[in-house]
Image (cartoon, rainbow, N blue to C red):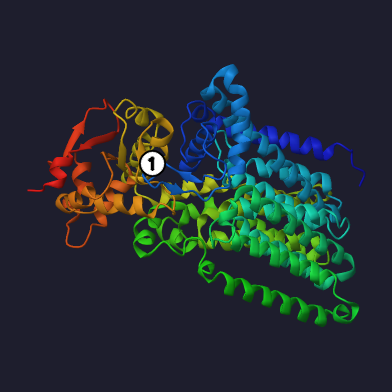
């Protein structure tokens, strides 16, 4: 099929414009007001401001989170620098706040353009064996624009690293797809995987899947894939070797950190990359047959896994392994995106459609694709990453971001081929098939279906109550709510953790709690105070550095702590329930902050230290 040279460019630019318009319609007003519904976006801006204020490159401590020691953050600072640089340049011209707002649009929407280009390119390669490169590219552009679990990470105000991780994952997929024909493309695939792992823990499973996918291609097609496998290993090794000294101080190179770049992640990159290089260079006697190649790969892979397990046994349980039972049961349960797919099915079955609908259609389309093109490597590479996304999704529904993204190329192929079948021989059945697959590949359609199902499954009064609670909860984390605290004398807030990042963005106060797993001490202090009786809470507060207690009665945390009261305390007798009713003990003094959804109390230290 003859293609116009600019067909891919036209597709991805059109898809980008469509996606950008959709994202702006939904989030532009919030971004202009710096209204962060996602705490991680707020905290990223806090880090950027700290960098601009002179905080050292290797100083990863958020000093206003659980003072006086602060909290070591596990995010890579190179993203902070890419945000801080343009803000610093624009600040003399338009002021810092305006510069931040400009970057709230330029950064995520610029990344969205890159993401769209990668998706369109991959879909084109998936569609090429059927002569549907152009059609698959256009279908992918439209599907990606409607793939909200993925594209919402590129909405205005999205400063968090998930959008960067999506781009790096897609870059790795495209490089691996092309490595059998252009071996050097695996070099940037390996580099992308290494940077992804150095940036955030989400990159670790992508590294594992990338190595396995490339290894399987080498097993089946050693002559075509050996050189690419070597380049993949070199790219991964090089990226890890470069990123470690850039983002980790030399004194911490040997520290066994399990949730950020450090010795364990470097070990994954070095051992994985070395195995890839070694397999690509096996002598003929060891790689002459499939069985010999399989034995060599199993032996080297097993030895590498054993070495990593022996060197870093504390990381076998993942980055959350050290949380402890209380933190897991009283904090993790409140983070909605950490629910498993099974838990979501029990709690909110309608939500399954929104979270996993498009990813499931992509998986089904992958099966049909591989029946036709099982000998082509492209489908297997994309399927590997899609299965990784599904594995993460089954464990924690935050994996919907990656599962939905990696399903797009298969969904685009299915749309393109059913459209061609209809055009070749029009019929009502083929028209319905095309319409059904087109709608099923778009995550937006599944979100609408999920909302409709929710309305049918849930009693109207219950649904109205839920919507009212959601509205109240959003008011708790609005800029107006946090600005009501700005004029109170500076101090340390004992706060519901959902409020933490917003307080740091909009005020000079410090906070004890935030939605970050490394802040165990501060978060557990807050949780134990709020789920205890006022008298027991007073003892805990006396040992803390808190000056204030701040809560929002409409926040889910208020009811959660009451329903998870400390041993021997009735739910209605907890401090959380008491404050939620507007009552307070004698060691707290209400502070007038106007018509705010927040309630602020000054801790009366004399009363705290001398309980009666």
Q: Residue at x 38, y 31 (%)?
A: 508
The residue lying toward the viewer, choosing from 401 and 270, is: 270
Residue 493, picture quadrant: top left
Q: Is residue 456 visible?
A: yes
| Extreme-front residue of the structure | 251
Vertical position of residue 316 compared to residue 49: above or below: below
| Extreme-top residue of the structure | 93
Secondary structure of the residue carrying tag 1 is: helix
Give coordinates of residue 245: x percent, y percent. Answer: 65, 51
Give coordinates of residue 174: x percent, y percent. Answer: 77, 52
Vertical position of residue 267 compared to residue 100: above or below: below
Give coordinates of residue 346: x percent, y percent. Answer: 42, 61
Residue 51, picture quadrant: top right
Horizontal arrangement in the rendering, residue 88 relative to residue 599 (left or right): right
Q: Give the residue number, with chain letter if any, for mark 1.
A: 500
Horizontal arrangement in the rendering, residue 343 relative to residue 403 (left or right): left
| Extreme-left residue of the structure | 612
Q: Residue at x 51, y 37 (%)?
A: 55
Q: Is residue 430 visible?
A: no
Horizontal arrangement in the rendering, residue 165 relative to residue 290 (left or right): left
Give coordinates of residue 400: x percent, y percent. Answer: 56, 53
């Amino acid at each position: 099929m003859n293609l116009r040279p600019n067909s891919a460019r036209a597709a991805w630019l059109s898809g980008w414009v469509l996606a950008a318009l959709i994202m702006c319609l939904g989030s532009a007003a919030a971004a202009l007001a710096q209204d962060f519904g996602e705490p991680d976006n707020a905290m990223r801006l806090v880090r950027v401001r700290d960098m601009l204020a002179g905080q050292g490159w290797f100083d990863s401590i958020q000093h206003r989170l659980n003072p006086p020691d602060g909290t070591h953050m596990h995010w890579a600072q190179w993203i902070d620098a890419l945000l801080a640089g343009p803000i610093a340049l624009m600040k003399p011209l338009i002021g810092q706040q305006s510069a931040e707002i400009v970057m709230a649009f330029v950064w995520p929407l610029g990344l969205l353009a890159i993401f769209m280009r990668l998706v369109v390119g991959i879909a084109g390669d998936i569609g090429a064996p059927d002569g549907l490169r152009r059609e698959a590219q256009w279908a992918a552009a439209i599907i990606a624009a409607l793939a909200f679990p993925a594209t919402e990470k590129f909405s205005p105000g999205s400063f968090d690293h998930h959008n960067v991780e999506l781009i790096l994952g897609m870059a790795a997929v495209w490089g691996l797809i092309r490595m059998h024909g252009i071996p050097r493309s695996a070099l940037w695939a390996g580099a992308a995987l290494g940077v992804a792992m150095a940036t955030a823990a989400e990159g670790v499973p992508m590294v594992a899947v990338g190595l396995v996918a490339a290894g399987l291609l080498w097993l089946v097609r050693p002559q075509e894939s050996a050189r690419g496998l070597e380049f993949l290993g070199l790219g991964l090794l090089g990226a890890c070797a470069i990123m470690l000294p850039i983002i980790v101080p030399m004194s911490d190179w040997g520290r066994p950190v399990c949730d950020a770049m450090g010795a364990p992640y470097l070990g994954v990159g070095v051992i994985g990359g070395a195995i890839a290089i070694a397999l690509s260079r096996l002598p003929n006697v060891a790689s002459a047959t499939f069985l010999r190649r399989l034995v060599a790969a199993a032996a080297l892979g097993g030895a590498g896994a054993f070495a990593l397990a022996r060197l870093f046994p504390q990381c076998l349980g993942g980055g959350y392994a050290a949380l402890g039972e209380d933190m897991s049961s009283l904090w993790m349960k409140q983070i909605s995106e950490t629910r498993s797919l099974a838990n979501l099915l029990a709690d909110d079955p309608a939500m399954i459609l929104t979270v996993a609908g498009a990813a499931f259609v992509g998986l089904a389309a992958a099966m049909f694709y591989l029946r036709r093109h099982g000998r082509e490597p492209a489908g297997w590479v994309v399927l590997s990453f899609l299965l990784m996304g599904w594995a993460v999704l089954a464990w924690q529904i935050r994996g919907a971001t990656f599962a939905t993204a990696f399903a797009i190329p298969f969904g685009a192929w299915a749309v393109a081929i059913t459209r061609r079948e209809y055009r070749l021989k029009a019929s009502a059945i083929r028209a319905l098939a095309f319409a059904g697959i087109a709608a099923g590949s778009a995550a937006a359609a599944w979100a609408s279906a999920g909302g409709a199902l929710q309305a049918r499954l849930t009693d109207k009064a219950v649904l109205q109550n839920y919507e009212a609670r959601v509205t109240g909860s959003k008011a708790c984390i609005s800029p107006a709510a946090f600005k009501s605290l700005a004029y109170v004398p500076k101090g340390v807030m004992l706060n519901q953790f959902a409020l933490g990042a917003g307080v740091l963005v909009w005020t000079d106060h410090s906070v004890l709690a935030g939605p970050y797993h490394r802040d165990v001490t501060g978060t557990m202090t807050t949780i134990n105070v709020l789920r205890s009786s006022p008298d027991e809470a007073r003892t805990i507060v006396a040992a803390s550095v808190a000056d204030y207690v701040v809560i929002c009665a409409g926040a889910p945390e208020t009811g959660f702590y009451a329903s998870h009261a400390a041993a021997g305390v009735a739910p209605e007798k907890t401090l959380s329930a008491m404050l939620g009713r507007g009552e307070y003990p004698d060691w707290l003094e209400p502070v007038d902050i106007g018509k705010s959804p927040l309630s602020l109390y000054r801790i009366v230290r004399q009363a705290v230290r001398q309980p009666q």
